[in-house]
Amino acid sequence: MPSPASAETATLAPPLASPVKPAIPQPPKLTGRHGLGRTTLHLVDHDRPDPWKPDRPRELMATITYPAASVKQFHRAPWLSKPVADLIDKTLDPTTTPPGVIDWAAIRAGSHIDAPVKRPRHGLPVILVSGGYPSAREFNTALVEGLADRGYAVVTVDHTYESPVVEFPGGRVEYGPEHISIDPVTMKKTIDARVADISFLLDALSALGSKHPRLPYGLRDGLNLSKVGMVGHSYGGYAAGESMYNDPRILAGVNLDGIMAHGLVEPYELGNVAEHGLDRPFMLIGAQFVHPETGEVYDINHLPDGPGNPSWREFWVNQRGWKRDFTLIGSAHNSFDDSQWLFPQLIRALRLPPHTYAQRIGRIDPARSIAVQHTYIAAFFNHHLRGRGGQLLNGPSRKHPEMRFVP
């Protein structure tokens, strides 16, 4: 989810004649002219009490985005549900983006609601996507649609009572905690809930035909659940690793700048994935950090000591399966979610200083950042779920100098 600009860079936005209408970057239509579809699932785990509200069963909302056979007569999906949009509108920094300055309802995803599935002979490989803490499942839409455009069924899920707000059928809304806590006990409970949610999600996907009779045409038998991968940003990257450690059905994973520990400040309490490694492929892609006073640039995950990310160092030593490590030059922590395309458009529309959100999204060109990320993530899953290529991941690339290979 977007965070406010730092106090050093906050500048009052000038008055506008009409609200800003940002646009999600559209994928390059690698699936052909047919476009993308998406559908939403309401999932209830009657065998598990909710970890945050034990008097009720665990209840989740998930979205599947996929290549479509046709999108004619199917409406484009909104980027955000109204409760999510309303919450973001209230929580962005009022000195840079006052409430009401953005027309959230006008922002449309590239996927079409309940369009029929373009199903290959052996079904669509599945990629699970896990967002940061706290975040809404919609806030990884550019990545989700970029992967679906390359022929994957991409599944996102909101972790109820952790996500800031979740809308359920009938307009019922459940909110996350008012005050975010990052103490080790809370974060351990959070990661355990996410891991259990992911395993339940895989069970639910296996039972789609019997539990969800009104699915888009072709989806019932359209998923190849023998080919499952997972990618996550921030705490979602930790969730990807811990879920792989817990559930052998996930064959390959990617961590986008996420510490793999449930203590986000020292003393760190390492997760199983960092402490024991995996016997399956896993890739790390890290951000950089620009010191707000000195301007010095750090690869924050690779400092030999001090305030770096000890979980990545431990994971690298303990990982038994295929492994790769990259740093996206010029990026920052939120370069890996929809902040990367949203904030630059706000800067232009509101005539803010160019580096207003540099601490959040870095100084890399946003279009280039998104393109390079999607190329590498797709190359990883193509290699490990489809057995295609993989040469790009074997060292530095002259074509993609923004992605530093970390030996």
Image (cartoon, grey):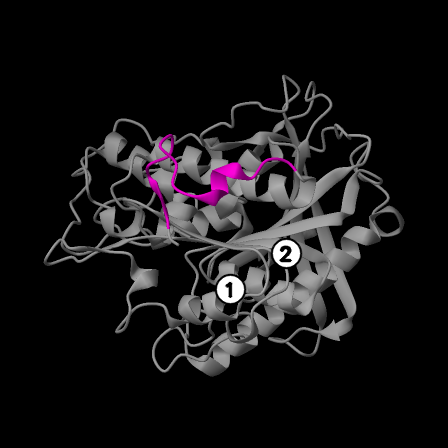
Locate residue 256, reporting x and y percent.
45, 53
Return the residue nearer the eye: 350 or 329: 329
- Disc 2 marks which amino acid? Arg
Q: Main secondary structure of the magenta part?
A: loop
Q: State which region is magenta.
A: 388-405
For label 2, the residue is: 172
- Residue placed under numbered mark 1 in the picture: 238
Depth order, front residue of 305/179 = 305
Q: CA distance from mark 1 to mark 2?
A: 30 Å
In the picture, the quarter occupied by the C terminus is: bottom left
Q: Position of residue 336 (x, y in %)?
A: 42, 47
Q: Determine the secondary structure under disc 1.
A: helix
**Do the CB atoms of the residues marked 1 and 2 lie less than 8 Å apart?**
no
Q: Give me the residue at 66% from left, 37% from top.
A: 152
Q: Along the horizontal axis of the image, is 8 left or right of 249? A: left
Left/right of residue 173 with respect to residue 97 in the rendered view: right
Query: What secondary structure is marked by label 2?
Result: loop
Q: Which residue shows up at 42% across the image and 53% down it?
A: 1
Q: Residues within 10 Å of mark 2 (few under 14, many from 20)?
A: few
In the rendered image, residue 407 lying in the magenta stretch gets the answer no
Question: Where is 184 relative to 292, above or below?
Answer: below
Residue 251 lies, in percent from the top left, at: 67, 55
Membership of 394 in magenta stretch: yes
Q: Is residue 164 shown to the viewer in this render?
A: no
